[in-house]
Structure formats: structure tokens, C-alpha cells
Amino acid sequence: MKKVVTIIVLIIIVALFGGSLYYLYQKNQESPEVFKTEQPTNETIIRKTVATGTLTPREEVDVKPNISGIVDQLMVKPGDTVEVGDLIAQLKVVPSINNLNSAKNQLRQAQINLENQEKIYKRQKELFDKSVISANDYDLAKNSYDNAKLEVTFAQENLEIIKTGTSKDAGNAATTEIKARITGMILDVPVEVGDQVIEANNFNEGTTIATIAKVDDMIFEGKVDESEVGKIEEDLPLEIKVGAIENTTFDAVLDYIAPQGVEENGAVQFEIEGSLKDTQGIFIRAGLSANASIILEKAEDVLAIKEALVQFDKETKAPFVEVETGDQEFERRDIELGLSDGINVQVLSGIDKDDKIKVWNKVQEPMAQNPRRR
């Protein structure tokens, strides 16, 4: 019995020894792990936040009439360029019957009063020439006669304005000719010939006949989230990209940040405005959607590495990299980091451009799928 146990123990020992030798042999046959390396490069690193919005003209004017009437002629269409004083539209005044009758009656009353005052004036003048009445009585009569003539003139002008919309003495105060008030491009003509328009007054904003804007002076109007508004400030540079204009970036400057936010879809948004520096001779249509990259920090032509190459000490959390010192031999180098854009990070000290950095966290390649068994 003891002999059998001894034989079994020896067999187990031999099997274990053989298995160990086979394992060591297999390990020796495996290729050693080879780490790739990358060298630092000179990069321009930008930390930015993005706002969405539109491009609009800085100066945009709605042309409204100062009399009510009907559009008789239109001299412009959207896209036309106009100068100050150019004729935009001609209105035709259609007076109301009540106002017309009232003006005619006022004129008749003024004429009757004038005839009466003229008779009184002539009688008083004859008496004054004969020294029958005093100079004061004569002056009163003459003054009443002059006032009566002014009332007739006023009534005639009022009737003329009601009929035609203007008068000889009105000048530019009331006119049926609608003219451009600024130099620019016609963006919109929301009326057509035959449409009735209303004058602008204290109770009505009036009918817009045309919209004129200076399209060579554009601004970006957008909104940023409350989580980003604390990171920005006025005079920061912007990079504007317009979806309708490919491969072009416009430089701008942040001019305005709203002091009060507006809640939209459960989030507080703050309005911002930025002035485009140069449109590069490109015609930008008003209202185009745009994205503005607000540049918070920028480091040009600095030594940088990919953030994926950086390791952090488990205890101190200090950043470091592994630099190749020989064939697949690496040593730790503590580094000082600067600006990061999420892909590349600036290296202030610890390595130079010729160092080869170990790629330690390489991504595992996906395993090939097993062929389907038949």
C-alpha cells in the first residue's frame, strides 16, 4: 500500500514539474510587448466656448410714412442699393368724406368772415382818414381783417393737405414721396402697389414700407448658457463660422453681454453681440445662422503633447510621462502642464521636442469575430 502511494506521489510531482516546464516554454515563445512612442510637437492651443446665433446688420431702419394713403408707385425692390434721399415709394392720398366736407365748410366760413372783416376795415379806414375815429380803433379793425386773411389761407392749406397729402408751405413735414433715410441695401419691401399704409403717430407705429440696412457692417447676435457666461468678458476675440459660407472664418470682437438672462426651455440664456472686423469682401446675407467660438485663452506655437500620453501619480496626482532612454527602456519624467484644448496639452517644462514619449494607454484592437460554425 505504501508503495502505491509513493508511486502516485511521484507521478504527481513529475506532472507538476513537466507542466511548469511547459508553461515557462510557452512564455518564452511569446513576443515581448513593444510600446510605441510619440514626440512632442509645436501646436496652437485654443480654449474656447461656442455660442449659436445669427448675423444681422448693425444699423437697420424701417421706413414709415408720415401720412396715411395708398401706395401708388414702388421704386425699389429687395437687394437694391439706395443713397440718402433716394425715392422709395409714392403715395396717393384718398381723403375721407367727413374730413373733406369739414375742410370745405371751414374754408367757406373763413371766406365769409374775411368778406365781413374787409367791409368793416374799409369803413373804419374812411372814418380814420376823416379823423372821425382814433388810431386805436383803426388798428383794431385792420388787425381783425389781417387775421381773417390768415384764417382763409390756413383753411385753404388744410383742404389741400386733405386732398393731396401735402401743401406748398408744408415742405418735408408732410409729403407723399417716401425717401431713404440712410445709405444701404433694401432688405424687404413688405407692401405692394395698392396697399393702404398708416402714418406713424403716438398711437400707431405705422406701416413699414421698406427696410434698409448697412450690410457692410454686420454683427453677431447669439446666446450663451448661464454655465458659460461667467467665463467670458467683453473684448474677447471671436471666430465666426457661417453654415452657408463654407471654409471661411470671420474674425470678430465680443462687444456686449446681457446683464440679465432669459429662461428658455428650462435653462437661462444670456444674449451677446460681437462686431465682425472684416467680411473679406464676401457678401453676407442678413439673418444667416452662425456659430461663434469665443476664445477664452490662446497659446500659439507652443510645445505640446497629446493628453492621452500624460499619466498621473496615484498619490500626489502630479502629471508625468515616460521617456524612452534605450530600446524599450523608459524613465519617468515629471512635467508641468499649461493650456489644454481637450486633445493636446501645453508642456511648460520637463521634456523637450526630441524626447520620445511612451504610449502607455493604447487602445485594444477589437478581436476578430469567430467564424460561424457549420
Image (spheres, rainbow, N blue to C red):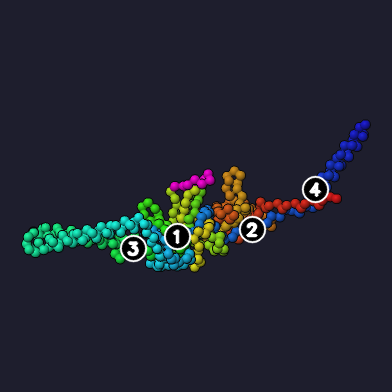
Q: Position of residue 282 (x, y in %)?
A: 51, 66
Q: Residue furthest top?
A: 1
Q: Nearer the viewer, mark 4 or mark 2?
A: 2
The mark that comes first in sequence, 1 or 2, is 2
CA gap between label 4 and label 2 equals 33 Å
What amino acid does circle 3 point to?
A: Thr
* Amino acid, disc 2: Glu
Dot 4 or dot 1: first in sequence order is 4
Q: Which residue is mark 2?
A: 38
Q: Which residue is mark 4?
A: 24
Please state the extent of the stretch shown in magenta in the rendering: 260-268
Q: Residue at x 48, y 57 (%)?
A: 220
Foreground mark, 3 or 4, reads 3
Q: Nearer the viewer, mark 1 or mark 2?
A: 1
In the depicted view, which residue is nearer to us: 298 or 165?
Answer: 165
Please state the horizontal and vertical placement of residue 11, each as a whole percent of the image. Answer: 88, 40
> How far apart in space, not on screen, are marks 1 and 2 (Cα)?
72 Å
Residue at horizontal 11%, vertical 58%? Answer: 137
Looking at the image, is mark 2 or mark 3 earlier in the sequence? Answer: 2
Q: Identify the image quadrant of residue 324.
A: bottom right
Choose the circle earlier in sequence order: 3 or 4. Answer: 4
Q: CA distance from mark 3 to mark 4?
A: 110 Å
Indicate the amino acid at tag 4.
Leu
Residue drawn where x is 46% and y is 57% of the image? 274
Residue with the mark numbered 3: 166
